[in-house]
Image (tube, helix red, strand yellow):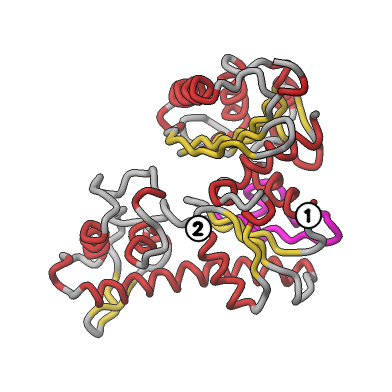
Amino acid sequence: MTQQQTGYCGWDIGGAHLKVARCDHNGQLQTVRQYPCALWRGIDELATVLQKVIDELDCQADIHAITMTGELVDAFSNRRQGVAAIIDCVAQTLPASLSHVFAGDRGWLSFEQAKNQWQSVASMNWQASAMLAANQLDTGLFVDIGSTTCDIVPFQQQHIQPRGYSDHERQRDGGLVYTGAIRTPLMAISNKAPLHGYFVPLAAEWFASSADIWCLLDELGEAQIQDSSADGQPWQKPYCRQRLARMLGTDAEAASDDEWQQVARWFADKQLQTILEGCFQVISASGLPATAPLVGAGVGRFMAKACARRLNRPYLDFSELCQHTDAAADHAPATALALLAKQQLS
C-alpha cells in the first residue's frame, strides 16, 4: 500500500464493546462499526475481536490511532495493569510502526511510551471527540451519551476546558456522569417508581436497564443494541414491559401498556435530570456563554437533544461535524480518532 492509499483507523477499546472507524487518505469516512467485546471476561476476548475486525476491514496496513476505557474492567487488578494488558494485546495484532496511542493534549505515544505514561492514555477517549468538535466550532458544550456513561466537556476559543482529566476527577466535577442509554440498571436511576397511585420501592436487582425504558419510548430500536438484556430475552416491547414490571415486584399483566409507558417516562425524566445536573455543574464552572450550542454525540444523543431544550441552548448533532454520518455520531471517539489521525499523522 502506498502512502497515498493509506487509510486511518480509529480504535476505541471499551469494557463491553470495540468501536472502529476508518477513513481513506482524503479523510473520507468509509466505515464506522461497533463490535461486542466482553473484556471483563479476559483479554482473550479483545484479541479475538481485534483479529475479526482486521480480517473484515483488511486494514492492517493503515495508520492506527488507539484509545481505551477497558482498563477499568475488573479483569484487571488496577488501571495500570489494564492499560499494559490492552496495549500488549493490540501490539500482537497491529504493527507498532503504524500504531499511535492517543494521549489527549499530550499528543500521540508509542506502545511502550503509553505503558509508561499510562495515566495519560487511560480513559481519554472523550478528549478525542471533544477536540474534534472544538476544532470545528469556537465555543460549545460537548455531551456524549453512550451505552454506559455520559461525558460533558465545555470548550471555548477552540480549546476544550475540562476541570479534571481522570475518571475520578471528572466524576467529582460533573464531567463524567455514570448513566447511559443502554446498560444502566434502573435501580441506579431511581429507587422508586409510580404505579396505581403509589410510589413503589424498586427491587435492588438488575431486572431491567435503561435500554428497556428507551425502547418502550421508541428512542432505541432492537437493531441498535448489541448488549444482552437482563433476562436474555429480546429488546421488544412485551419483554421490556415484563423486565420493567419485575423492578416493581409484579408482572406486565398487572398494568396496561399505557401505564407502563408512564412508568418508563418516570425513569426517562429521572435519567435526564441526572445528566442535566452534570451539565449545570460543568456550565457553572466554565462560564460558557448562554448562546453556546450543545453538541450531542453517542447512541443516547436523543437525551442530549432533550437537555439542550431544557438548557435553552441551540442543539448541534455531532454527525454534522462528521460528514453527516449517524454511525460516526453513535461512536464519536473512534470517528474522531480516525479523522484526527488523518489531520495530525499523515
Q: Classify the position of the C terminus by image quarter.
A: top right
**Camera-side residue: 222 or 91?**
222
Vertical comparison of 51 with 9: above or below: above
Specify which label sits upstream in the sequence, 1 or 2.
1
Task: Identify the residue at horizontal 54%, vertical 37% (top origin).
Answer: 19
**Residue of label 2:** 300
Mark drawn on residue 112:
none
Q: Residue 148 placed where, x, y %?
A: 48, 51
In reply to whether residue 243 is colored magenta, the answer given is no
Task: Identify the residue at horizontal 25%, vertical 85% (top origin).
Answer: 197
Let me know if residue 82 appears in the view.
Answer: yes
Q: Classify the position of the N terminus by image quarter.
A: top right
**Camera-side residue: 290 or 136?**
136
**Outermost residue, left side:** 253
The amino acid pointed to by label 2 is Gly
Query: Seen in the image, is 258 located left or right of residue 70?
Result: left
Between circles 1 and 2, the one closer to the viewer is 1
Vertical comparison of 306 with 116: above or below: below
Stretch in magenta: 149-175
Task: Identify the residue at horizontal 51%, vertical 35% (top origin).
Answer: 18
In reply to whether residue 159 is colored magenta, the answer given is yes
